[in-house]
Image: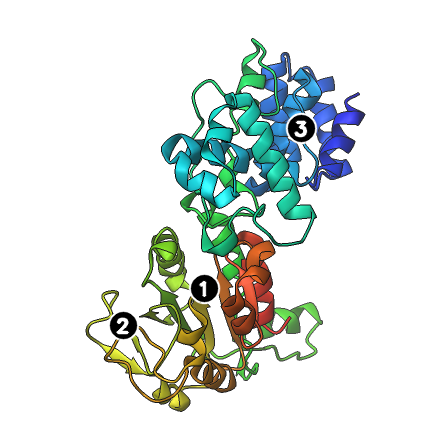
Amino acid sequence: MFVDFFYLLKSSGVPVSPTAFLTLHKALAGGMIHSLNEFYTAARAILVKSERYFDIFDQVFAHHFAGADLPDAGGFELDDMARLLLEQWLKNPRELARALGEEESTLAGMSPDELIQYFKERLKEQTEAHHGGSKWIGTGGTSPVGHSGYHPGGMRVGGVSRNRSAVKVAMDRRYRDYSLEGPLTQAMMGEALKRLRNLVPAGPKDQVNVDETIYQTMKNAGEIEIVFEQSLKDRLKIILAIDNGGWSMDPYIPVVQTLFNYARAQFKELTTYFFHNTIYDNVWADAARYKKAQRVSEFARFDPETRLIVVGDASMAPYELMTADGSIHLEERSGRPSIEQLRFLTETFPRSAWLNPVPERMWGYTRTITMIGQIFPMFELSIDGLEKAVAHLSGK
């Protein structure tokens, strides 16, 4: 029973285990589930082990039990992005038409349903064709796609409506912000913290754990087994540098700061600095970048095992990165290009990473992202990207 549902979940990326599926069948056989609503709640609680899969589970549930359209692997994201493009069109049709390379009058003649379909087709071209030109959304630094979950009135993408509350709940897509891809949000904080907890010190085990030694000795019938552990003073040191100088980074700064503030319980030695676009001679301990300057050259005195994490979109005019005194701020004039400072930082801190909120598929269209990515190991600022960055910083 419900075998097709099980395999559909697995093929959609939800790691459902056979044991969990048998547990669900046991609940059904025991008379604990009496309606579709109860089945929805029980199935999600038993089969789904992480919040990140809630959104996919809801889409598969709506498809299996109500006939809602089930997009392909890339379609989950395309539906959301098409809705966001429609929202942008309603707010500023001229700007979106210019970004798409279309006449505003052409789009104005389409119905909302036709606009949704048109946006989806353009997004598919962007993710599949892999060639530039005016048809690409976001070309030239214009990105009309926002990060909210607004639903334009009366619009429904990829589904049909039914008068069964479990299906309605599933089709509400309440958990879209829990997915692995896309920018970090407050809703994803728990999942992000789970990734950061894997970033642990890797120093020598040079201290005797007395309790564990006694336990293992007793377990060995008196044969002494000394157990060593890392010294408590061996704390992981982290430097977090955040680009807070432009509007494109504004949506991410509170989330990043909150994420690492929560992580202070584990990372006792975490220092946060701020910069604009790229790093020159100084970074600042205050968010206004007015006081508390820290000279980058002084980082050479720091512990080389310190992990350096830079958060920024790496998007700027090439001269800001390559030209001596390329900073747009007159007070930063050292005679050295920023790219040399970035190389100095990666040489000083071999365990470093750059987290970029720009979707990875778009990196190749911005020259400075490509250039910085050749210096820093770069990862997307998402749950998936954070997981890869932690593995890199931990040397796994």
Foreground: disc 1 or disc 3: 1
Distance from the alpha carbon under mark 1 to that under mark 2:
22 Å
State whether residue 217 is above or below residue 165.
below
**Residue pictured at 43% horizontal, 47% vertical:** 185
Residue 327 lies in quadrant: bottom left
Q: Label 2 belongs to which residue?
A: 285
Q: Which residue is mark 3?
A: 60
Front in this rendered view, residue 247 or 296: 247
Residue 268: percent from the left, percent from the top?
37, 70
Q: Which residue extends farthest top?
A: 163
Q: Amino acid at mark 3?
A: Val
Q: Is residue 62 visible?
A: yes
Q: For mark 3, give the secondary structure.
A: helix
Amino acid at dot 2: Ala
Query: Helix or strand or loop: what does disc 1 sit on?
Result: loop
- Asked if marks 2 and 3 touch (Cβ < 8 Å), the reply is no
| Residue pictured at 66% horizontal, 54% vertical | 131
Q: Which mark is residue 315?
A: 1
Q: Is residue 22 visible?
A: no
- The foreground one among 182 and 199 is 182
Tally the numbered discs.
Answer: 3
**Figure check: 153 above or below 301:** above
How far across and how far down the image is residue 53, in percent? 60, 39
Q: CA distance from mark 2 to mark 3?
A: 47 Å
- Looking at marks 1 and 3 on the same chain, the residue that comes earlier in the sequence is marked by 3
Q: Residues within 10 Å of mark 2 (few under 14, many from 20)?
A: some
In terms of depth relative to the viewer, which is nearer, 378 or 20? Answer: 378
Work out whether mark 2 precedes mark 3 in sequence or the reverse, and give the earlier one.
3
Mark 3, Cα crowd under 10 Å, few <14 / some 14-19 / many 20+, is many
**256 with respect to 349 (left or right):** left
Between marks 1 and 2 in the image, the one whose residue lies nearer the viewer: 1
Answer with mark 1 or mark 2, whichever residue precedes in sequence: 2
